[in-house]
Image (cartoon, rainbow, N blue to C red):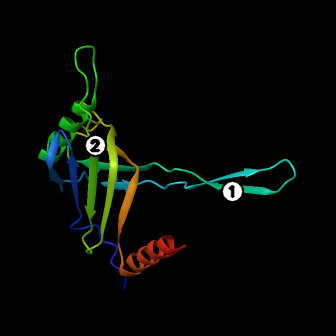
Amino acid sequence: MQNVSGFGTQVTVVATQSFPVGFTVAKFADDKDPLKVEEIEPTGVELLIDGSLFTFDKGAIIKVAVSVIAGSDDDINLKILLQARKSSPSIIPLPDVTSMVITYGNGGNVAFSSGSIISGPLADSINQSGRMNGNTYTFAFGSFSGAQSALELVADVGRSLIGAFG
């Protein structure tokens, strides 16, 4: 039976200027998707005038959204990271490069690098029932590595070997 529980998942965020030692996110929101890795589109496709299909490789941004409990230590750290990237007439943002490691409860690990925080709330919101909403912070990354299963790890090693000798 496949374990589909997200219990025990942790996210570690490291930013070169703001958080060089990093911090762990584990207080996920219960009113939003706690962790969402968006689909990527690494291949472009066009239909040519003669009706044939043309496909091509392209760069793909990897977007990861993390939702945390409002007011928690995780929320405060993510707000600090977001504020460090926000510019204003009197403040120049820090040139942070962000990395993220997701450790799933089942032992799988994935790492994202060459990224930055791109959106999030500067203040907390309250819903109509009077409860504070969880806060969602979105990151964009250029690189991905890791595996959630042994099969994925073997396939990645094989692809690397083929690329080295091909």
Specify the farthest residue to the front: 165
Relative to 129, residue 113 above or below: below
Residue at 22% x, 51% y is 13
Horizontal and vertical percent position of residue 132? 22, 39
> Circle 1: is it few (<14), some (14-19), or many (20+) Cα within 10 Å?
few
Q: Amino acid at mark 2?
A: Val
Sequence order check: which comes first, mark 1 or mark 2? 1
The residue nearer to you, when weighing 35 against 41, is 41
52 sits left or right of 106 in the view:
right
**Secondary structure category for the residue under label 2:** loop
Numbered tag placed on residue 116 in the rendering: none
Q: Amino acid at mark 1?
A: Thr
Q: Is residue 47 visible?
A: yes
Which residue matches tag 2? Answer: 97
Residue at 82% x, 57% y is 52
**Secondary structure category for the residue under label 1:** strand
Q: What quarter of the picture does the C terminus occupy?
A: bottom right
Residue at 80% x, 50% y is 48
Relative to 158, residue 10 above or below: above
The residue nearer to you, when weighing 94 against 13, is 94
Relative to 111, residue 18 above or below: above
Q: Quadrant of residue 85?
A: top left
Which residue matches tag 1? Answer: 55
Residue at 15% x, 46% y is 20
Q: Quadrant of residue 89?
A: top left
Cα separation between marks 1 and 2:
32 Å
**Discs 1, 2 touching: Cβ within 8 Å:** no
Q: Is residue 125 visible?
A: no
82 sits left or right of 147 in the view:
left
Horizontal and vertical percent position of residue 73? 12, 45
Relative to 113, residue 159 above or below: below
